[in-house]
Amino acid sequence: MYYLFWEHSENNKPKPRPEIERARKRRERNEEIDRLLDEMNDYTRLYETFGDAEYAERILRVKEKLRKLAEVAE
């Protein structure tokens, strides 16, 4: 019997095929990047409006998270 999307492991639990799993992880990573970029844009606008150092610190934390995501992709 052929399975288009799932392979069966030894304990009969279906597991995703590798290419589907890679696509899922890539999609999740892209969604996380989009979320972080939105967050950074929000903090940037708040910082430009109010000049609060807390917003500048949050921008740096978001940039660090983005940098780590970029390292994983390489």
Image: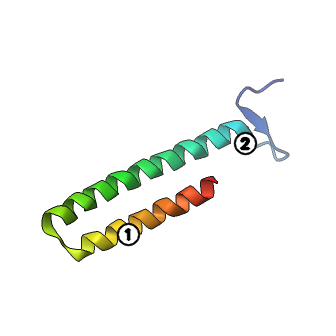
Q: Residue 60 carries which label?
A: 1
| Precedes in sequence: disc 2 or disc 1 | 2
Badge 1: residue crowd in 10 Å (few <14, some 14–19, many ≥20): few
Which sits in the foreground, 49 or 26?
49
Q: Do the residues labelled 2 and 1 touch (CB within 8 Å)?
A: no
Residue type at tag 1 = Leu
Furthest-left residue in this view: 50
The answer, for residue 16, to whether it is visible in the render is no
State the image coordinates of residue 51 (x, y, percent, origin top left): 17, 70
Residue that numbered label 2 is attached to: 15
Which sits in the foreground, 1 or 59?
59
Q: Closer to us: mark 2 or mark 1?
A: 1
In this rendering, would 40 be left or right of 22?
A: left
Which sits in the foreground, 12 or 50?
50
State the residue at coordinates (47%, 64%): 65
State the image coordinates of residue 60 (x, y, percent, origin top left): 38, 69
* Rendered image quadrant of residue 23: top right
State the image coordinates of residue 48 (x, y, percent, origin top left): 18, 63
Secondary structure under the numbered disc 1 in the rendered image: helix
Give the quarter of the figure containing the C terminus.
Answer: bottom right
Secondary structure under the numbered disc 2 in the rendered image: strand
State the residue at coordinates (21%, 65%): 47
Badge 2: residue crowd in 10 Å (few <14, some 14–19, many ≥20): few
Residue type at tag 2 = Lys
The answer, for residue 47, to whether it is visible in the render is yes
In this rendering, would 68 be left or right of 15?
A: left
Q: Residue 26 carries which label?
A: none
State the residue at coordinates (66%, 37%): 20
Furthest-top residue in this view: 1
Q: Give the Cα distance between marks 2 and 1.
A: 38 Å
In this rendering, would 33 be left or right of 4?
A: left
